[in-house]
Image (cartoon, rainbow, N blue to C red):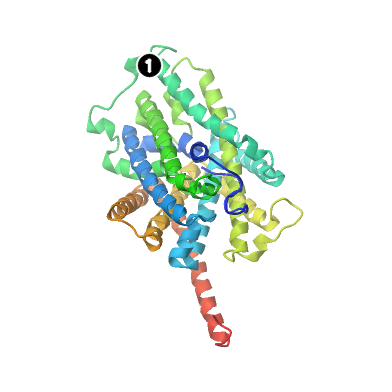
Amino acid sequence: MEIPARAGGKGGKNGGGKLKWWQLSLIGVGCTIGTGYFLGSGIGIYKTGPSFIIAFILAGLTAMIVSEILGKMFIQDPQKGSFRSYTKKAFGRWAGFGSGWVYWFSEMLISGSQLTALSILTRFWFPNIPLWILASIYATLGIIVVLIGTKGFERVENIFAVMKVAAIFMFIILAILVLSGNFGGSVSDFTIPNSMDSLFANGIIGLWTSLIFGFYAFGGIEIMGILSMRLQNKKEVIKSTTVMLIILTSIYLISIFLASGFAAFDQFNAQESPFVIALAKYNLAFFPHIFIAGIIIAGFSTMAASLFAVTSMLLTMAEEGDAPKVFAKKGKLKVPPFALALTISVLVLSIIISRLVPDQVYEYITTAAGLMLIYNWFFILISYPKLIKATKLDHVKRFLAMFLILLAVSGTVLDKTNRIGFFVSILFIVIVLIVILFMSKGKKKNKNELPRGLYQ
């Protein structure tokens, strides 16, 4: 779901290198799959049962529309700032400022979500160690990686991406082998919903409240707009993102279908991977250890990469005047010290929250992070007709995607646990709006104070 500090980084018009469209597709798959999928999908299954597959289909459809629209804007006007630059061009500086900070907050929430997920997964081996201690260890390791710099780290990033995909395929293959009569299993162990009640475990409301977790699994497609600067042929961006999303959606649907058929919906939770729960009763003692270890290694890579991304983006916004200039100041470290300090401060806050509410913190943060991401999807959709002449089909797609986004957002209000994540996301939005308001007043004040001939 995250990438190293390439977001908004320098490198000229062509970015840091040349990529073929299929290479970008594979990188996109690796960047999008995170612990939000490996762990968060269990929450979705618990809330709605096998119908969680529908949530993935709707989220995948929305992601495809958003990525197509972002791709069309990119083809017409390649911008390293991607959606933030297009929002600024469409509605003015305030919108670019808001979009950038909403994205920054969402990435920080994702970092906190990954941090909590890694800690939860590690308790598989160390159940008595408090969540906040494990979170502190992972946060420290993540900061060390940021301090070391990107050299060497980016070389192994693709290996970590392959590990994530390999973990999913390992589950799919083992599940098929179990259904074939291996490891003490049989085809009769698999349950296919044969009624509306078995498909929708908690009714339509259950599906509605689970939508956000389907959307969260696709969080990261907006990063593809930034990575597109490295394409050899910029016009192939839509093909690249479409293939990426088809692969991603296929993997998600097959794995979730299998997981939800092996165990009752109420056995899934936010504390264990749904894939480990699905195969827990079979003679696969090695599977949980290998699978969880693979997720932790891959999850740590995405968390560290996310820390790179937010620190880099804060630097870029500071250079463009959308963040305090102090965050652009460089010291002896390989990263701007004040930008890094803010990143560390937010991580510490995440650890404090995990100490106060350890049982619910992952779901709170995941909900808030997912919402912050799709708020930016909405920004992309409304910016499009301001910059490109949209066809009737474009408008139909846009309104469908906006409707599905609003459906996912409203669904969080219906669930008591998700509701807290919703209010957390609204709090961040209000903070950004207050800052924009003060910026606007400050601009008007300066305009009134400056001599007419000096103000432009």
Residue at x 48% of width, y 63% of height: 88
Residue at x 48% of width, y 57% of height: 77
Residue 36 vs 369, above or below: the answer is above
Q: Is residue 142 left or right of residue 423?
A: right
Residue 253 visible somewhere in the drawing: yes
Q: Nearer the viewer, residue 298 or 165?
A: 165
Residue 81 vs 370, above or below: the answer is below
* Kind of residue indicated by mark 1: Leu
Residue 217 visible somewhere in the drawing: no
Task: Assign the C terminus to one quadrant of the image.
Answer: bottom right
Residue at x 29% of width, y 38% of height: 202
In the rendered image, residue 431, in percent from the top left (x then y), is placed at 50, 63
Q: Nearer the viewer, residue 225 or 232?
A: 232
Residue that extends furthest to the right in the rendered view of this protein:
332
User: Which residue has dot 1 on it?
Assistant: 179
In the rendered image, residue 180, in percent from the top left (x then y), is placed at 38, 13
